Image (cartoon, coloured by chain):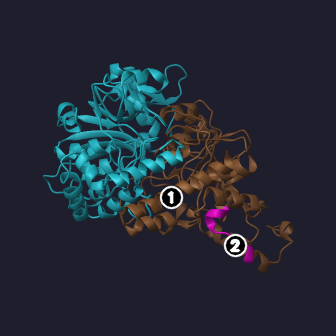
Amino acid sequence: MANLYTTRDKYNRRQLQAMKKRYDAPVLVCCAGSREVEDRETVFVGIGISDLAGAIAKLVHTPNVILVAEAGYVGFPSLSVLISPADNSAGTMAMCHQALPEMFIDQQSGFIDISYLGFAQMDMFGNVNVSYITGRKMKMNGSGGGGDIASSAGRIVYTAEFNPRQWVEKVDYMTEAGFLDGSPDARKKANLVGGGPSAVVTDRGIFRFAPDTHQLYLAEVFPWQDKEDIKEVKNSFPWDLKVARELKIIEPPTERELWALKLMDPLCQYIIANIMDRPIGKILSEGVLHLEQYDRFLQIIERAIQEVLQTVT
Amino acid sequence: MTEKEAVETFLHDGDSFCIGGFVMWRQPEAIMREIARQGKKNLSIIDESGNFEGIDLLIELGMLDRIDIAYNMTRQVGGISGTPALERGINEGIPRPVETGGVLATPKNKVKSSARWVKLVDWTNFEISLRFMAGAINVPFMPTRSSLGTDIPRYNKDIKVINDPYENKPLLLIPAYKPDVAFISVQKADRRGNGQIWGFKGTDYWKARAAKHVVLLAEELVPTEKIYENPGLTVIPAYCTDAVVHLPFNCHPTGCFGCYTMDGLSFVSKLRQRQTREGALEWIDEWIYGPKNHFGYCDKIGWEKLDRLVKSEHKINNLPG
């Protein structure tokens, strides 16, 4: 950690703290996550942050990527108004309408290079649980296509807002395979074709997996993360988290990334954590079902989609 | 044929069935409401992800004995549950206790001795698709690499993990599924039973071939000449189909690509009401048992609102009208 400050000599501590306040956690995750894609890759996106990271990648960094969604839509610009992978906003701008099993067949035969996924629990080797979380109430959420993606996509980038409860010694129920028991060829032995998780992008740094031990380690931090912050991050883990000897510094979101995010998320929906506090959520939670309310609600979505259409096509 | 006749004719107590579409789109909700009205018993359903209103409605009424599913939106809708009846079943045993083959089960002290358990089985999306594919191809199973090494095959006893005879490496075998009935919403169908789908296809191609009987719910009933104009859109050819019901807006509150967008306002307001057992039963009395049939339901929603959903979909898809 000796040279932690060398790349950020430009700013003093106070300036860095002020910079930090400018960005909400989901913005940091979306923008940092978008830089994980290489051009001409095929990207399997989900809903929410994982979808917006793909959208920013396509608009700003890697224009030739192809975004796909599991219902069967291929080659569309992502939009935050997507609430399901089958939404019309994906379909109307897609270059191919196919079927759900075809998406997973294509994936098992290696056409999907990278996929963004969310997670609820993760262990040291990147094994994930999104389904059964032990808590006050028992729940079974189901992993949907996540288990298929984690098995067969070229590599997985997990995106989430940092939460100490996410990190566990052992997941309650493994829905998505990471590096299993962490042994060097665990995935190969299990006969999984995908490369497994490659990064975990959070607002408290980017974590990667050591090539030899497949153990999660802190690889990159935002410029405002000082020694105390890194210590706090480290203490959130139930195991002794390794930290890279030379931590890379993640550049803050650029103007272009923020422009793309604004375009794809015109209502800043994903900056607001709770769906019901978002502009559309507020209309939903009013519970009024008059025709005028329908008009108000649908116009918001229509405008967002039309704006993207005008910019992108 | 009406939706009432279709359910009476093809779906019997104890049957298994599936529905077309995917998460909030092109799902035949009108059929789920009709099944509820007819008070069918001991049904089992298999679905990838979704039909959160329809499946939850049948759970609330205790009609499902077995649910095979990959995703059910428990954690998604801003702090409220997407499938409150399922959650009530798991935590309180009401209306029926739920068990998932070793991972979780309704606490024993909440379960009456006379209670009949509901079996909930966890799969991934692709595995559910493969069940239909195997059923359609008429083979006992399909192999896959999905979920190898995870807890899904560990707890789901229907999945077998074998060393395949060619390469001697582990593979998952996913058993075939041939439901008694498949109800599939399509944008266009003719009287002969050709079903045309626009937009994503979901797993409907395979569902139509795996099921013993297939009922199409058509937004638009067209003469066969219209089918000949775009044969590439015909996902379900006439020989698969047993019956066609001309039933506009049958997907409401989910959407139908190119026809009408999903009705988030109606869905969320009903979902909030359904969070408690009392609210759910009131909703069922008012919205399911209240209207006599699907058109009574449309009257109750209001045709102007349905038309607004059409206008929105046309705008988004840049279609005339």
Query: Is residue A26 part of the magenta span, yes or no?
Result: yes
At a point 57% along the width and 37% down the height, the residue shown is A152
Q: Main secondary structure of the magenta part?
A: helix
**Chain B color in figure:** cyan
Kindly tell me whether residue A197 is visible in this rendering.
yes
Local SS, label 1: helix
Q: If you read the primary sequence from the N terminus, does the residue marked by circle 1 or circle 2 appear first?
A: 2
Mark 1 nearby-residue class (10 Å; few <14, some 14–19, many ≥20): some
Q: Position of residue A208 (x, y in %)?
A: 68, 53
Residue numbers of the magenta segment:
A18-28
Q: Position of residue B219 (x, y in %)?
A: 36, 37
Most extreme residue toward the left is B114
Local SS, label 2: helix
Query: The residue under label 1 is which amino acid type?
Result: Gln
Q: Nearer the viewer, mark 1 or mark 2?
A: 1
Res B12 quadrant in image: top left
What residue would you read off at disc 1? A299
Res A192 quadrant in image: top right
Nearest the eye: B257 or A59: B257
Nearest the eye: A258 or A212: A258
At a point 48% along the width and 33% down the height, the residue shown is A101
